[in-house]
């Protein structure tokens, strides 16, 4: 009877007894994420479930990511299978208006330049000793596109999913702080004052808007087949939006499905943040490289904008190059605000929106190209 | 394949490939716009 009593009391305090320093640090870190999401408004849709998931997974003896843990169930069902980020992509496609890009297709090249940070960061990560596929996962933070980073990371480096996802979403929300100093450092005051002509708002036919997602899917997927799931899901969502005949599916994609998957995906990302896996020097390197990647994207985009400025005889304000990343429409708004600071007559928003929409497609294409090249090199299977 | 061959190959083909695919996409958009130009809707007056 006595031993049963002792065992019972021990069972009651099992969690307290087994609470390690690492778990306490992770719970504190999770609370910080909750604070940033709730109080500061940094990507709350993701940071709140990530933070809560990180608390749950670090409760000793709760075994949330064990064989029968409920977080393990969602992780296996949605992250290991790569389904969650793809479902999010359908929602993103349904929410995105590509009309500014259709009106000004040449600006899409800024969306390519805005991805170069990915590839430069890849080299940096390799130089710092990351394994090949780990380096790919870290570099993709530079896509400035959460679902792409999650998709690639869960495919090639699932052990780094937590760090990569937290870095991707944190830096995306910090774009208004990260980009302006780089914009000012790389452009002259004269360049920042350039007034671009009123955006040529060619009306786009409904047929063009419908054909666009279908044509892009076929064309880009044939060129980079490994990226077909990424391209296909974004464009499916956009087709639901533009076709105008499946309002219920469009609405479900951008609301119910996106909301449910965001919740579960966030919890699953938090669930990968177990103390013994997350509290490593490597995590700090991932956070540092993620910051470098997004900064490099901005820098290369601006340099490309400068080249376009020179080639067009000063008709393009290089600041719009900074919007060639995937943080839509936040980056375009940053460009508009920065342009206005130096010239009240400068309205860069529509031009920046074109570049920003190009950045959205650019990030997906960059990941697709990367996956296809990796397959071609025999690094990943077919 | 050694690390640096892998890194430089992926970086160069990745950057070039991304630029090429997006440039081709811009041409595709121009082509689609040409095939399906916007036609102003007939005005209410014309509709009678």
Image (cartoon, rainbow, N blue to C red):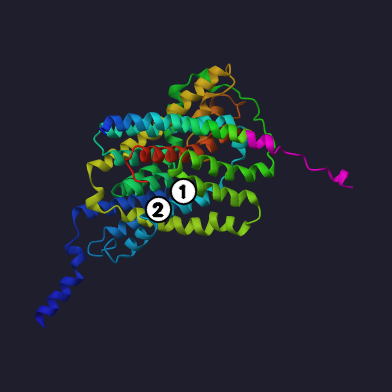
Rendered view: A73 above or below B30: below
Is residue A163 left or right of A201 when viewed as pictured? left
Rendered view: A91 above or below A172: below
Q: Chain under label 1? A: A
Is residue A321 left or right of A118 when viewed as pictured? right
Rendered view: A68 above or below B25: below
The image position of residue B28, as x and y in percent, is: 59, 35
Label 2 – label 1 distance at C-alpha: 10 Å
Determine the secondary structure under disc 1: helix
> Is residue A309 or residue A87 the one in the foreground?
A87
Q: Residue furthest left?
A: A2
Query: What range of the chain is rendered magenta?
Result: B31-48
The image position of residue A55, as x and y in percent, is: 31, 57
Q: Split into 4 quadrants, where in the image is the N terminus of chain A? A: bottom left
Q: Which residue is mark 2?
A: A82
> Is residue A33 or residue A141 the one in the foreground?
A141
The image position of residue A275, as x and y in percent, is: 24, 52
Q: Please tell me which residue is depicted at 16% across the width and 74% down the height of the picture.
A: A9
């Amino acid at each position: 009877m006595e031993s049963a009593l002792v065992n019972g009391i021990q069972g009651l305090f099992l969690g307290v007894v087994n609470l390690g320093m690492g778990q306490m640090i992770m719970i504190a870190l999770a609370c910080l994420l909750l604070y940033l999401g709730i109080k500061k408004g940094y990507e709350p849709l993701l940071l709140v479930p990530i933070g809560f998931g990180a608390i749950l997974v670090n409760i000793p003896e709760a075994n949330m990511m064990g064989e029968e843990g409920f977080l393990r169930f969602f992780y296996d069902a949605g992250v290991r299978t790569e389904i969650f980020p793809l479902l999010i992509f359908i929602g993103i496609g349904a929410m995105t208006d590509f009309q500014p890009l259709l009106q000004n297709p040449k600006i899409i090249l800024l969306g390519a330049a805005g991805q170069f940070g990915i590839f430069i960061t890849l080299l940096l990560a390799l130089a710092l000793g990351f394994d090949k596929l780990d380096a790919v996962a870290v570099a993709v933070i530079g896509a400035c596109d959460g679902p792409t980073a999650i998709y690639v990371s869960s495919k090639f480096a699932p052990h780094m999913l937590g760090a990569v996802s937290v870095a991707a979403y944190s830096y995306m929300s910090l774009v208004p702080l990260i980009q302006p100093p780089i914009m000012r450092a790389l452009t002259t005051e004269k360049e920042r004052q350039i007034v671009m002509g009123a955006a040529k708002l060619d009306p786009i036919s409904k047929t063009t808007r419908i054909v666009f997602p279908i044509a892009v899917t076929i064309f880009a997927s044939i060129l980079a087949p490994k990226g077909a799931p990424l391209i296909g899901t974004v464009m499916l969502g956009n087709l639901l939006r533009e076709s105008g005949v499946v309002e219920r599916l469009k609405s479900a994609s951008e609301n119910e499905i996106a909301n449910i998957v965001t919740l579960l995906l966030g919890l699953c990302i938090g669930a990968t943040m177990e103390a013994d896996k997350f509290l490593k020097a490597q995590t700090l390197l991932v956070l540092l490289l993620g910051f470098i990647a997004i900064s490099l994207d901005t820098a290369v985009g601006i340099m490309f904008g400068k080249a376009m400025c020179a080639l067009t005889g000063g008709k393009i304000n290089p600041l719009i190059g900074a919007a060639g990343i995937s943080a839509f429409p936040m980056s375009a708004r940053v460009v508009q605000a920065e342009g206005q600071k130096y010239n009240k007559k400068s309205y860069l928003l529509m031009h920046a929106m074109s570049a920003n929409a190009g950045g959205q497609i650019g990030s997906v294409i960059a990941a697709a190209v990367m996956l296809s090249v990796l397959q071609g090199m025999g690094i990943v299977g077919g | 394949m050694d690390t640096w061959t892998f890194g430089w190959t992926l970086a160069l083909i990745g950057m070039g490939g991304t630029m090429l695919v997006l440039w081709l996409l811009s041409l595709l958009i121009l082509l689609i716009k040409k095939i399906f130009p916007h036609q102003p809707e007939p005005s209410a007056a014309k509709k009678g």
